[in-house]
Image: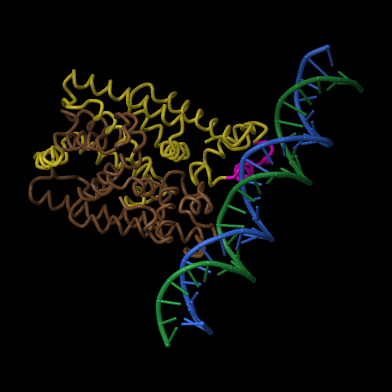
Chain colours: A brown, B yellow, C green, D blue
Amino acid sequence: MRSASDLTARARIRDAALARFGADGIAATSVRAVAADAGVSAALVLHHFGSKEGLRQACDEYVLDAIRAGGDADISALGEMLQAATPLRRYLARALLDGSEAATTLFTEVVERTERWLAQGEAEGWVRPAADARARAVTYVSWLLAPLVLGDQVGRLLGGDPAETATAVRSARAGLEMLTGGLFADDRWLKAFTAVDER
Amino acid sequence: MRSASDLTARARIRDAALARFGADGIAATSVRAVAADAGVSAALVLHHFGSKEGLRQACDEYVLDAIRAGGDADISALGEMLQAATPLRRYLARALLDGSEAATTLFTEVVERTERWLAQGEAEGWVRPAADARARAVTYVSWLLAPLVLGDQVGRLLGGDPAETATAVRSARAGLEMLTGGLFADDRWLKAFTAVDER
DNA sequence: GCGTGAACTGAACAACTGTTCAATACTCTG
DNA sequence: CAGAGTATTGAACAGTTGTTCAGTTCACGC
């Protein structure tokens, strides 16, 4: 963990913004609050990033780069990456909900990578065939991101110790079990859903 | 669909707040904006709800009641309920992320109801046994809520037509298939995860 | 009709917002 | 050392924020 003082002011501001934006939301965070966290004046924030919107975009790009840098290997790397960097996680969750441009790009990228990955698995026999490959990829990715976005709620009900890694692992394992063996032993719900859907 | 003018001013304000809070976030929404949407003065909003925070709590309670009223039968009823009421959905997603008291209560309630439901299914043989029943229930609920919270992203990649019901159904079906048959045909990922976890 | 209380309003207030600007401190190049 | 350019600041700005308040309109029981 790097200390706050050896970073350039610009980087300190960006980190402070990332944390504040993630914790309280962008609209609820003032430029002055970010400046105070970074130990600089509000004017300097604007000097470096032009405007609050510019600061937000800088955060977007930083998160995007950070995830792209770590996530080239496979999907699980992205998961580990996100588990490690809590402020990043929170910010990303907000960005996804607010529909920022960077978040939209990221979501699209991850979905497409996942769709290819699942198609490959299907060809090699370790992924079951799907009726709607696109919908499956989208749903799978949103499931991957769910504990991230709802991290506070999930963490609270699974022990809620500050070291979130343990609870994240517990949740990930439960998810993997459902995806491996299935949750339902027969297709009663699938049938019921189909029946309702055809109406 | 009820028209805006037959409602009491208080109800109109609450509905306007629900929509605005959900669309833009609470911090980004001003009391004056809500008042304008409801066709009243800003002072009247404060007269009825005391403060902006009071207005938020009223929204919380309203959402909680609306969901409780419809969701007593089983889980799928909650799903349909949420699909129908888009403004409610959006507001709930924000509330879950912000960790409001009502959202926390709701999440806890749903998890506990789900855990009992899954335990019953396990006893009756239509749900596969789980190593960690609690973690499974929490994860399952967060998966249920994922397309809700990430609705904009999911909708965009699955056609994005304004009638969101169609895409929601598509996503729900893909999810149900994964939960019924499983996604992975063998346990390679589960084994890999266990191996990493034990380190 | 009359009064009483609720619904409702416009104007005002202090605090805070993002942003600008002139001025100062700092760091490196020539 | 001179100077150019960057980093950094405090003070000020116009606009918006949540909230207050005195006053007006309205409906209804006596």
x and y, in percent, of residue D21 in the image: 77, 35
What span is in magenta?
B30-45
Q: Main secondary structure of the magenta part?
A: helix
Of C28 and B110, nearer the camera is C28
The residue that appears at 47% across and 25% down in the rendered structure is: B65
x and y, in percent, of residue A113 in the image: 22, 55
In the rendered view of the protein, which quadrant contains the C terminus of chain B?
A: top left
The residue that appears at 57% across and 35% down in the rendered structure is: B53
| Left or right of residue A30: residue B140 | left
In the figure, residue B97 lies in which quadrant?
Answer: top left
Of A143 and A65, nearer the camera is A65
Q: Is residue A67 within the magenta segment?
A: no
| Left or right of residue A77: residue B159 | right
The residue that appears at 30% across and 39% down in the rendered structure is: A147
In the figure, residue B35 lies in which quadrant?
Answer: top right
In the figure, residue A128 lies in which quadrant?
Answer: top left
Of B74 and A192, nearer the camera is B74
x and y, in percent, of residue B154 in the image: 34, 47
**Above or below, comparing residue A152 to residue A55 in the picture:** above
x and y, in percent, of residue B5 in the image: 63, 37
**Above or below, comparing residue C2 to residue A80 in the picture:** above
